[in-house]
Image (cartoon, coloured by chain):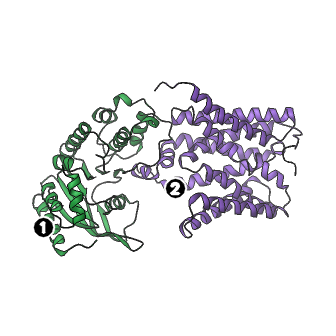
Chain colours: A green, B purple
Amino acid sequence: MRLSYSDLQFGATFQRDVKSKRGCKKVTVLRTQNLSFIDNRDVILDAVSFSLESRKIHGLTGPNGSGKTTLLEILMGYMKPTQGRVEYFIPQPVAYLPQQSAQQRLLPVSVQEFVEMGTWGKSSTPPALSMKEAFRELGLDHIARQSILRLSGGEWKKVNLARTLVQSADLYLLDEPFNHLDLDTEKRLGTLLQRLAHENGKTFFVVSHDWHAMNHYFDSLILLNHKLIAQGSVQSVGELYMNWKDPAHHQWMHQHCH
Amino acid sequence: MDFAARTVMEWNSLSWEALILLSIFAAPLGCLLIFRRMSYFGDALGHSALAGVVVIYLMGWQSPWALSAGAIASVLLTSQILKFLESQFRLPTDLALTVSSAGMLGLGILLSASAPIQLEHLLVGDLAAINESMVWFLRLLAVVMLSFLIFMWKPLWASVIDARFARSLGFSSHRFDFLLLALTSVTVVGLIQSVGAILVATYLVFPAAASLAWAKSLRSLVVSSIVFALASSFFGAYASMRLQFAPAPAIATFGFLATLLSHGVARLIPSKD
């Protein structure tokens, strides 16, 4: 889709806004410069430049098919950008929760063993959560010994989330972690991520369509629609998104904003 | 040719040892292949490795090392053809796999006409005629396979289960993919000599498939697949000795029955969780 010049202006304003508020302890963990990805002449990402500060929950939102997952996969190094580059200022590797987990459900392992695989890495960075904490925080204790073959969609999501959070990393990329979660779990996950970011110094980059979660727990938000439309506080970017002129997206907002 | 009626003249201790070694290294590899979604691939490689093995025979070599080199070369060629069919011609994976493996099998059979080896030996193996150097080759394979399993348990499983996840743990999954391909092709050489190119699945797929019904952990999956492989080897070999038919098809049939029985019985027993 085409974007007007004024959209980009918004982007510039919000980015400046973030920079001026940078706290003294916060550092940049990641910066992208003019990231573009073209697949068979379709422009998936178009000159996306942004940076992420440490100790924050950064949201990434935008219409379906706007390139969010592609962006995360490029950040993970799974795909090479057509143009532009990604700079990390923290030790690798980065932990990643994919939107759909690879087909692992044939595995004859219990929930406990599956989550434990997250601790297999050799990195010296401390994990966001220990095994014990992950099970307690995500409410998995009662299914710890159960086989992963018999989990519901929501439980499977939580188990994958737990495996990601016990990984050793400074930056966690989470693709729609709030999907399939009930309200109570959403609340627990939101406050958990906040605590891990603000107190334990972890950084999260979270794809979400969940305005409730974004409003309550996220520190900043990036609006992406192939181009970076805006980056700033959840409220300001949210407002921009609400008032977006495109009728298709107006309707989309209407459905998701109760 | 009359494969099934081939009698087993003499079973010696080498044949028995070969069966045990095959069970030890091929069954765990089969477990790894399942989760890489490569069990069909492993079987197809068995078919395609035949061409490489025949070419080595044509060149006048017979040592298992030379045969392995031939098999690896033809497996690599097949996987390149496969990639090409998938990416350039946009064939779906199963179609590309069937096309490339059937093509290579055809080529192998065609070439074998002028090779100093009976086609029958390549297709259904010849356990009774297994020689000392082949058994040494199998011993080495078993040691290599077991040490990979013991010392690289985590990176191996992580990259097999989910290559991207493995990379986010800091493991190089490409390297392990190549390792898996190399191990598979070397294993296939061992299997071609003993159960033949057509019945590679006997050791590579059945034991893993059978133990999936029971295993509660990766460790128990690997151990029980070895047990299943040993069991169908012994039953198959014993039956072929008593009833005088070729061992490989008998072992394959027992493997098949074991897989069905294993899943059937597991169904009947109520699980605790």
Disc 1 designates what residue? A13
Front residue (pair B7, A130): B7
Question: As displayed, is residue B173 above or below residue A246?
Answer: above
Identify the subunit bearing mark 2.
Answer: B
Looking at the image, residue B268 sits to the left or right of residue A104; the answer is right
Q: Position of residue A43 (x, y in %)?
A: 34, 71
The residue at the point 58 percent across, 26 percent down is B268
Q: Specify the quadrant that holds the N terminus of chain A.
A: bottom left
> Helix, strand or loop at disc 1?
helix
Q: Which mark is residue B175?
A: 2
Q: CA distance from mark 2 to mark 1?
A: 45 Å
> Do marks 2 and 1 share a chain?
no
Question: As displayed, is residue B245 above or below residue B163?
Answer: above
Residue A31 visible, this orientation: yes
Residue A55 visible, this orientation: no
Looking at the image, residue A102 sits to the left or right of residue A248; the answer is right
Question: As displayed, is residue A175 above or below residue B142?
Answer: below
Q: Residues within 10 Å of mark 2 (few under 14, many from 20)?
A: few
Question: As displayed, is residue A33 above or below residue A122?
Answer: below
> Helix, strand or loop at disc 2?
helix
- Which amino acid, by three-letter code, is at mark 1? Thr
- Which amino acid, by three-letter code, is at mark 2? Arg
Q: Residues within 10 Å of mark 1 (few under 14, many from 20)?
A: few
Q: Quadrant of residue B104?
A: bottom right
Q: Quadrant of residue A11?
A: bottom left
Q: Position of residue B263 (x, y in %)?
A: 60, 33
Front residue (pair A230, B263): B263
Q: Position of residue B79 (x, y in %)?
A: 61, 61
Front residue (pair B159, B56): B159
The residue at the point 62 percent across, 45 percent down is B144
